[in-house]
Amino acid sequence: MLKKSPKSTNHNSSVNLMSLERMGSRYPSRLSFSRSMLRTMVKEQWNIRRVKFDLDQQGYGRAIYEVDVSKQTYSLICFSQYIDDNERSDRVIADSWDTAYVLHIGKISFDDIERLNKNIPLQEAGRNSPDELVLSRANKSVRLFEKVVECLSNGIQPGIREINNVGYLLRTTAVYGSGKFGLADFVRTKAVTHFNQPFRAEMLTLFVIREFSIQLVEHIAYQRNPKTAVKLDNKIKHYFII
């Protein structure tokens, strides 16, 4: 005969369940959207390729990556611009960024590029279409970006300890989706894309931005010293986050 469990008399049980210690012990897990997203990418053999990398010697310009998923293509366009060090801020209310991004449904046409070129760097002040899923921006790490470029340009690899102390080359200060600023709302995203679960489009965006950040430092290092520059070692790349 089954016995009923005694009712809890602890009125603070919800507080205990949501304590930082308990929440921290649940992350990451197989249910984390980041891990489930990566498993899906590997299982379905998503193909990510760089189709445009129009950057000058200082790394300013634009790049486009295309992601093939089944019979659909998604495009991430990256804008890299010069800003003064005094303009760089990680606050959400900042109005200048080193880089800005948008994830677009399908291949990007010339008209799309011109429209996005005017609106994406403006972030909140710009407007997007329902063909855009995610809007993001990121700043260079003050402590690590230039240091990694300098190391690679001189033919040496950056130290793991320094990388672990910071963790990123570019730090995203906002990742918007679900209808913000004219972006596709989640109802449309679920209906017309492969991202039928929350945060999957955002995770793909961050995954590609991470790759762009690595290719950006490698590009600048090569432009600075073509004779001695090297690329990041594959064993080091996985230490970087975004």
Image (cartoon, rainbow, N blue to C red):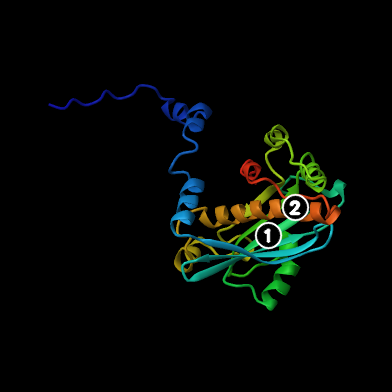
Point out residue 38 in the picture as x, y percentages from the top left corner: 50, 51
- State whether residue 154 appears in this view: yes
The quarter of the picture where residue 29 lies is top left
- Residue farthest left in this picture: 1
Which numbered disc flags the more N-terminal residue, 2 or 1?
1
The quarter of the picture where residue 107 lies is bottom right
Please tell me whether residue 76 is drawn above or below residue 14 in the rendered image.
below
The image quadrant where one finds the N terminus is top left
Point out residue 99 in the picture as x, y percentages from the top left corner: 74, 56
Please tell me whether residue 164 is drawn above or below residue 112 in the rendered image.
above
The quarter of the picture where residue 82 lies is bottom right
216, 104: nearer the viewer: 216
Tag 2 secondary structure: helix
Q: Which mark is residue 101?
A: 1
Q: Nearer the viewer, mark 2 or mark 1?
A: 2
Give the class, few, some or many, for how many residues have Cα within 10 Å of label 1's Cα (few <14, many ≥20). many
Q: Amino acid at mark 1?
A: Tyr
Residue drawn at 63 percent across, 40 percent down: 239
Point out residue 67 in the picture as x, y percentages from the top left corner: 56, 64
Residue drawn at 86 percent across, 47 percent down: 85
Marks 2 and 1 close (CB-CB < 8 Å):
no
Q: Amino acid at mark 2?
A: Glu
